[in-house]
Image (tube, grey):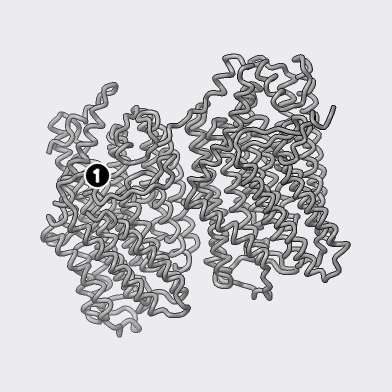
């Protein structure tokens, strides 16, 4: 198995960015064609990983190792398993789409712009494929920098405020995570006698419950900011609204998944007892996020802000699915991460399309667009349906699995004589689906139907061929996942089973403080 | 006493002699070479740079090749891993500072003889201080280092701010010297009480350890005063009052030099006296140091937030970094001490890179100090803006730059150490570095994300400064990418402290012996 394949997927965008720096000035076409080519190449190489991936093997595949600071056990370790495969594919898939979507959207410093997008691509992929905490942390921090520049240089009027807020929120969380990582490092040394931060070694630790609580808290803060969970979500609307279209797409499409992926990969399997103890809190925050995000989205006059708040709501489903600790919930959650990347990414691109034409994002300025830009309206409506979760689109599968998982969790607790609390979560989350339909459809109605509110918006060009090329792959993905999700789910299910098993094993150590809930885990 | 008894091993002192000789030579150039100022400045900075580099090369290659401790000159002068490391750092900083000075001198139409010579004499003082095996030697080194710096700080003598800087540094520095001297005399008295009066560091340490755990107040007082004298040079809170004003008023290259080399030298002295042998615990200085670290990190970072002058911001940031480095001393383990070594090197590289860019941007009558003067430099001078951004990110602790490894090493040492509150202070440290992100980022924001308001002055780049900046930036990135060799070297260099304290150890009773042995020896993987 070509074990360097993953390294190539990682290195291609970064090398592309490096080459970009040395290109002659002022050749905008060269820059964007080159970036598009690099992104497409990256996607093609990652297809090799997709097809070469063996779902039955729950360990890390396509592993690659290189010594970095061997004396400290801090080395280059990457690999991919069923938990990260889909997210890696999502990232490489969105890469070309983002570049193509950003074709005309910036008006200055083009070279730097595309270089930052390519660097960001490498950094995000790195965090997904890291198989030790050190590499993970490295990329976790690295991806901040290009995003910081993307928002800060090419963003809207409040860009400086938004970008600094984005940076600081994330940094405070990750700094605490660093201390927790060093603590784990010490623990590995004490328990296994080796210097290592490899996931495999860290997973094997036995950590006292009290320490788990602290460590979980440190990791959870870092990840919750990134997700973003209510109430640390406030950087998100600012960042999204101020970011250029490409930045918003990457932010929504991939960057937010770092948070949920962090919970999935690290916070939950490393500290299962603490995760279980935090379950009621996290579920509460998740459903609060779902409803709150939806309600705030409903009243936004700005389309982009509406989509931004819808992210808060959608990511709530991901968190809900993760923290019910069962196969359905977790599969639904990962699928929902991908879905959100595709649908919300597409929505931000669509907002970008109209913004490029009118330089306005205010809903009340529009109306009757369906008659003016029919093709655009069709695409928008399909993506809206996917975002709402209409059966036949990807959103349905993800939300359904998450709600199913949550329901099964509630049922098993009720059966075991527990409270009805978990049912409440399902009920409220399901309510969120309705709210989602309300804010999206209401927005669509006001923008696309009725009569145009401004006379200058009566003659707008419909989608160009380039824009059709941007949305075509997204629409294919929406329907593919919606109609035949098992192409994707079967790649990850064995890994999720292994993940659940890992958590269960961690809970069995609970001799000192028995957990009533532990018995009901993973029975479905 | 015959010369033989004095053990005059001149080979050990080659770097110091080279630097002193270069200083004299630089002065002679002023009186003998008839050439335009411009050429003389070139010759003088060239001599200085080459001498420092040669001395650094000799230190690293010849002195560094044999491990173990070598003493000479009647047990006054010691060359060991610690000395080799810090001498290399100091000499590198001096070489880069000389290169940077050329431009400043040109801008201010100053002759360079005195300036460069003073820089070299100060460097020689640092080298002696780093190698001091005796408290008197340490004091002499400190004075040779400080007095030229008082003058250098006030180089721009028609500028009130520069004069303020020089005077403030002189007055407060003298106060600190007084503390130091008083501390030394108390310790001398203490060793006398213990039966063998001596100012030799090893003897003092042994005497303290022998009298532990009930160390007499005389020794505790002496130790505290000595410590305060050194911490003053580091710029730790509450002995930092001079830092912002002195750093602001001094020429840019001298500010850079002070912030890295003086700090490194003072840390070398702190390590030599208080590092690794359990003296801190024996003198009950541990809690004091704990408080000092916490205060320094908080005050340094919070004060830096409020600065609108980049130079002042960097001054406060240097206070903050002193706090991080002190954490390594606080940890006291082998890794903690090695982390101090590594951080000093990393800080030198990234800070000089940052100052180098400021020097590059400064023109005659247009010193770049305020934040808004950096507006839009990313489009005007993209390379310098990138270097500034890299050094800011490194100071912030972004991986994989050298600043990240320094912080990682420090925090690793603190988390692995076992003293009460070690996790708490590590958490405080990382939170403070998150705070620091705000003011470092602001520099990046202004230089990349704001448009220039005023037209840029005509630009005359300086080869020397360009070289210095590029070198420092390259070190910041390269050590960051391949830190393994440097981390190992720092660890090996810190071994010499352990070795010298092991020589003391037989005289130590069991209670302090455990304090010596807290540093775990990690199995290499």
Q: Residue A498: image x %, image y %? A: 19, 40
Q: Is residue B36 above or below residue A335?
A: below
| Residue at (59, 67) in percent of width and height | B375
Which residue is denoted by mark 1 in the rendering? A322
Q: Residue A249: image x %, image y %? A: 33, 64
How crowded pointer 1 is (Cα within 10 Å; few <14, some 14-19, many 20+) is rated as many
Q: Could you tell me which secondary element the residue under label 1 belongs to? A: helix
Depth check: give the residue in front, B46 or B107. Answer: B46
Image side of residue A297 versus residue B123, left or right: left
Image side of residue B389 versus residue B181, left or right: left
Q: Is residue A155 above or below residue A398?
A: below
The answer to whether residue B269 shows anywhere in this view is yes
Image side of residue B166 versus residue B367, left or right: right
Q: How many marks?
A: 1
The quadrant of the image that shows the C terminus of chain B is top left
The quadrant of the image that shows the N terminus of chain B is top right
Q: Is residue B151 above or below residue A353?
A: above
Farthest bottom residue in view: A459
Depth check: give the residue in front, B164 or B77. Answer: B77
Image side of residue B431 versus residue B37, left or right: left
Q: Residue B308: image x %, image y %? A: 64, 57
| Residue at (32, 46) in percent of width and height | A131
Farthest right residue in view: B31
Quadrant for residue A31, please give it.
bottom left
The answer to whether residue B287 shows anywhere in this view is no
Q: Residue A262: image x %, image y %? A: 32, 46
The chain ID associated with circle 1 is A
């Amino acid at each position: 198995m070509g074990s360097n394949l993953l390294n190539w997927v990682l290195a291609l965008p970064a090398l592309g960015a490096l080459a970009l720096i040395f290109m002659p000035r002022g050749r905008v076409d060269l820059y964007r064609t080159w970036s598009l080519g690099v992104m497409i190449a990256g996607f093609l190489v990652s297809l090799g990983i997709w097809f070469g991936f063996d779902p039955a093997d729950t360990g890390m595949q396509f592993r690659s190792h290189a010594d970095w600071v061997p004396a400290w056990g801090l080395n280059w370790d990457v690999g991919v398993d069923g938990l990260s495969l889909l997210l890696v594919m999502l990232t490489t898939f969105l890469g070309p789409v983002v570049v193509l979507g950003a074709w005309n959207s910036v008006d200055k410093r083009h070279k730097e712009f595309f270089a930052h997008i390519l660097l960001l691509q490498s950094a995000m992929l790195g965090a997904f494929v890291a198989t030790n905490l050190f590499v993970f942390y490295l990329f976790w921090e690295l991806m901040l920098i290009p995003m910081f520049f993307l928002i800060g240089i090419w963003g809207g009027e409040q860009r400086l405020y938004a970008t600094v807020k984005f940076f600081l929120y994330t940094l405070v969380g990750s700094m605490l995570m660093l201390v927790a990582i060093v603590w784990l490092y010490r623990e590995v040394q004490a328990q296994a006698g080796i210097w290592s931060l490899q996931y495999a070694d860290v997973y094997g630790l036995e950590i006292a419950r009290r320490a788990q609580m602290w460590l979980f808290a440190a990791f959870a803060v870092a990840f919750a900011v990134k997700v973003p969970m209510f109430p640390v979500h406030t950087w998100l609307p600012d960042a999204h609204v101020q970011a250029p279209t490409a930045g918003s797409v990457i932010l929504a499409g991939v960057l937010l998944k770092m948070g949920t992926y962090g919970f999935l990969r690290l916070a939950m399997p490393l500290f299962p007892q603490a995760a279980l103890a935090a379950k009621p809190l996290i579920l509460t925050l998740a459903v609060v996020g779902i409803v709150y995000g939806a309600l705030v989205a409903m009243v936004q006059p700005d389309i982009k802000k509406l989509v931004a708040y819808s992210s808060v709501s959608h990511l709530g489903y991901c968190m809900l699915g993760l923290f019910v600790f069962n196969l359905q919930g977790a599969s639904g959650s990962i699928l929902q991460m991908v879905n959100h990347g595709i649908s919300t990414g597409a929505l931000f691109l669509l907002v970008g399309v109209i913004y490029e034409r009118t330089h306005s994002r205010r809903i009340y300025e529009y109306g009757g667009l369906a008659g003016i830009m029919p093709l655009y309206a069709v695409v928008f409506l399909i993506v809206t349906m996917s975002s709402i979760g209409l059966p036949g689109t990807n959103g349905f599968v993800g939300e359904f699995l998450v709600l199913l998982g949550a329901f099964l969790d509630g049922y098993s607790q009720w059966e075991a004589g527990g409270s009805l609390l978990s049912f409440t979560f399902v009920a409220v989350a399901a309510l969120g689906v309705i709210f989602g339909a309300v804010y999206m459809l209401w927005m669509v109605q006001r923008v696309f139907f009725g009569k145009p509110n401004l006379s200058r918006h009566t003659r707008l060009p419909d989608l160009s061929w380039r824009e059709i090329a941007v949305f075509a792959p997204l629409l294919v993905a929406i329907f593919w996942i919606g109609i035949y999700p098992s192409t994707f789910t079967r790649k990850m299910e064995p890994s999720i089973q292994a993940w659940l098993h890992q958590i269960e094993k961690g809970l069995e150590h609970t001799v000192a403080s028995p957990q009533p809930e532990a018995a009901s885990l993973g029975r479905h | 006493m015959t010369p033989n008894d004095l053990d005059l091993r001149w080979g050990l002192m080659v770097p110091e002699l080279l630097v002193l000789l270069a200083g004299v030579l630089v002065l002679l150039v002023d009186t003998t070479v008839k050439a335009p100022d411009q050429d003389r400045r070139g010759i003088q900075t060239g001599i200085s740079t080459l001498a420092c580099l040669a001395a650094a090369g000799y230190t690293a290659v010849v002195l560094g090749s044999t491990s173990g401790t070598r003493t000479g000159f009647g047990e006054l002068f010691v060359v060991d891993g610690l000395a080799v490391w810090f001498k290399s750092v100091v000499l590198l900083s001096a070489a880069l500072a000389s290169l940077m000075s050329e431009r400043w001198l040109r801008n201010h139409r100053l002759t360079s003889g005195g300036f460069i010579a003073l820089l070299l004499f100060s460097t020689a003082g640092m080298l002696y201080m780093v190698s001091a095996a005796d408290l008197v030697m340490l004091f002499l080194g400190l004075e040779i280092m400080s007095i030229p710096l008082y003058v250098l700080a006030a180089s721009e003598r028609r500028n009130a701010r520069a004069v303020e800087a020089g005077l403030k540094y002189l007055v407060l520095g003298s106060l600190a010297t007084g503390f130091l001297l008083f501390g030394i005399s108390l310790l001398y008295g203490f060793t006398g009480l213990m039966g063998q009066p001596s100012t030799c560091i090893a003897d003092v340490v042994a005497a303290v350890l022998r009298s532990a755990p009930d160390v007499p107040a005389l020794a505790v007082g002496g130790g505290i005063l000595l410590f305060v004298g050194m911490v003053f040079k580091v710029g730790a809170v509450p002995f930092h009052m001079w830092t912002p004003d002195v750093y602001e008023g001094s020429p840019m290259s001298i500010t850079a030099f002070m912030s890295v080399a003086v700090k490194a030298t003072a840390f070398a002295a702190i390590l030599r006296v208080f590092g690794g042998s359990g003296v801190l615990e024996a003198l009950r200085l541990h809690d004091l140091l704990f408080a000092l670290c916490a205060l320094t990190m908080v005050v340094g970072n919070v004060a830096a937030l409020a600065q609108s002058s980049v130079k002042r911001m960097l001054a406060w940031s240097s206070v903050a970094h002193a706090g991080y480095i002190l954490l390594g001393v606080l940890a006291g383990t082998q890794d903690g001490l090695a982390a101090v070594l590594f951080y000093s090197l990393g800080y030198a590289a990234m800070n000089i890179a940052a100052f180098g860019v400021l020097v590059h941007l400064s023109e005659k009558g247009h010193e770049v100090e305020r934040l808004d003067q950096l507006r839009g430099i990313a489009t005007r001078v993209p390379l310098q803006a990138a270097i500034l951004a890299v050094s800011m990110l490194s100071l912030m602790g972004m991986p994989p730059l050298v600043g990240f490894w320094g912080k990682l090493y420090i925090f690793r040492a603190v988390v692995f150490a076992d003293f009460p509150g070690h996790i708490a202070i590590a958490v405080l440290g990382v939170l403070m570095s998150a705070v620091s992100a705000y003011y470092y980022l602001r520099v990046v924001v202004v230089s990349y994300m704001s448009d220039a308001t005023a037209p840029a002055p005509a630009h005359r780049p300086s080869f020397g400064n360009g070289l210095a900046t590029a070198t420092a930036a390259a070190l910041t990135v390269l050590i960051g990418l391949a830190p393994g060799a440097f981390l190992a070297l720092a660890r090996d260099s810190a071994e010499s402290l352990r070795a010298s304290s092991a020589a003391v150890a037989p005289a130590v009773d069991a209670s302090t012996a455990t304090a010596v042995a807290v540093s775990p020896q990690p199995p290499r993987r």
